[in-house]
Amino acid sequence: MDKFIIYGGNPLRGRVRISGSKNAALPILCSSILSGGVCTYTNVPDLDDISTVCKVLEQLGVVPEKTGKNSLRLHPQNITSHEAPYDLVKKMRASILVLGPLLARLGRAKVSLPGGCAIGVRPIDMHLKAFAKMGAEIDLSHGYVVARADKLRGTRIVFDNTTVGGTENVMMAACLAEGTTVIEGAAKEPEVTDLAGVLTAMGAQIQGAGESTMVIEGVKSLSGTTYEVIPDRIETGTFLVAAGITKGRVTIEGGRAAHVTAVIEKLMDMGLSISEGQGGLIEVDGGCDLKPVHVETVPYPGFPTDMQAQIMALSCVAQGASSITENIFENRFMHVPELVRMGAVLDEKGRTVLVQGIERFQGASVMATDLRASASLVLAGLNALGYTEVRRIYHLDRGYEGLDAKLTALGARVTREKGGL
Ligand code: EPZ
């Protein structure tokens, strides 16, 4: 398994281009199942998770054609299977997002239960309850969701808690259902709004995307389309933190400040200066004494859980006491013991980690455990005295396109070593 070797201490300088959003691209690719025509997507990040979802789609009969490093054309005319197998779904939980489209297009689906992952149990009960309310028969058998619906019916779906994937799955199913579906308590993430954008481009009738109540009028069919995926707001936030943790000065191209306002606000509270230039450039100057911060992760537009590990790394080298509370996932502090190995002073109390600021991290060998935890260890390595070895960076390759090359281009000393434990 590959690892990163990082020699810390170089302030990042220069420009970096943000890639397309992984969490927008995944549901958008799944939405092609709903279409009778060719779907072309641009600004698709070149990531392992994208390759995995293409394998799932291929298994269903969708023919994927890579037309460039970041562009894909999908041919979903002939869906020949309704089954998403365990060995692919276990690799990438978001494969559960084929469930809604398959039910809507074919009237049946057999999708492996995604199972949990490092950060939590991650049930899909809210997805399944919604489909049942839309008239689907749902059985769980031998680790699979087996669903059937002659015709999905529009209805009112009320999500008691915010679920991004649940909102996206129901949106896609509702596009071809009979009648009107109202989703109360819909997730408002930009990735949900982007999915509504591509569905609308395919002929769907959707009102209220990005708000807590969404209304979807079912239509008879959806056409193919050409669509550009939004930039990745979590990669954008990660580079903002990278500038802060190395006291660098970075210009971020291709990001959307409007998608990371909660992150920008917290980073400016910590002392970073962040401004939006013309053409959507985001300028960040991290040359400051970092002040402590108090963060609680909440659904969009609040502070995103996917940025929790990264801002924790930054708070470790702020002056004074910070606190980080994780409200979305039950086990998203696995970066804590690894950061402690690098000298951080962290005290985990249930959903909150209390941080006592230190001068600087010390380089060490650490283990990546999940995607965003890995990012926080890389960030700590960029700051650390000496060498840091981040092992098992396959976690990173799932969600960050060419991170080592982008960091090196900004003056960081990062090398990728192949193989090893
Ligand atoms: C999406 O996951 C993202 N993944 C996650 O990003 C992100 O952290 C999460 O939304 C929250 O913003 C993709 O978009 C592919 P949820 P999702 O359904 O849809 C519980 C990353 O690092 N829940 O909003 O799976 C669930 O366990 C990844 O890029 C139920 O209990 O998240 C969690 O505690 C990690 N029952 C909370 O709700 C359900 O039926 C939020 O989950 C569904 C969810």
Image (tube, rainbow, N blue to C red):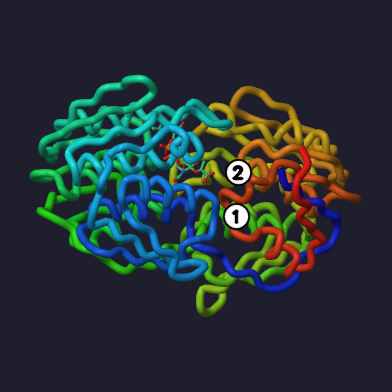
Disc 2 residue lies near ligand 1 with CB under 8 A: yes
Residue 277 in the image: state x and y as whole percent: 56, 76
Helix, strand or loop at label 2? It is helix
For the N terminus, the quadrant is top right
Whether residue 299 sits left or right of residue 332 in the image: it is: left
Whether residue 71 sits left or right of residue 421 in the image: it is: left
Give ligand 1's quarter of the image.
top left
Residue at the image point whose x is 27% and y is 39% from the top: 82
- Image vertical order of residue 285 relative to residue 312, above or below: below
Q: Amino acid at mark 1?
A: Tyr
Check residue 400 in the rendering and tell me which mark sits there, or answer none: 1
Residue 226 in the image: state x and y as whole percent: 32, 69
Distance of label 2 from label 1 (alpha carbons): 9 Å
Helix, strand or loop at label 1? It is loop
**Marks 1 and 2: in contact by CB < 8 Å?**
yes
The quadrant holding residue 195 is: bottom left
In the image, farthest residue toward the bottom: 278
Taking depth in this image into account, of 80 and 9 the one nearest to the observer is: 80
- Image vertical order of residue 12 relative to residue 367, above or below: below
The quadrant holding residue 130 is: top left
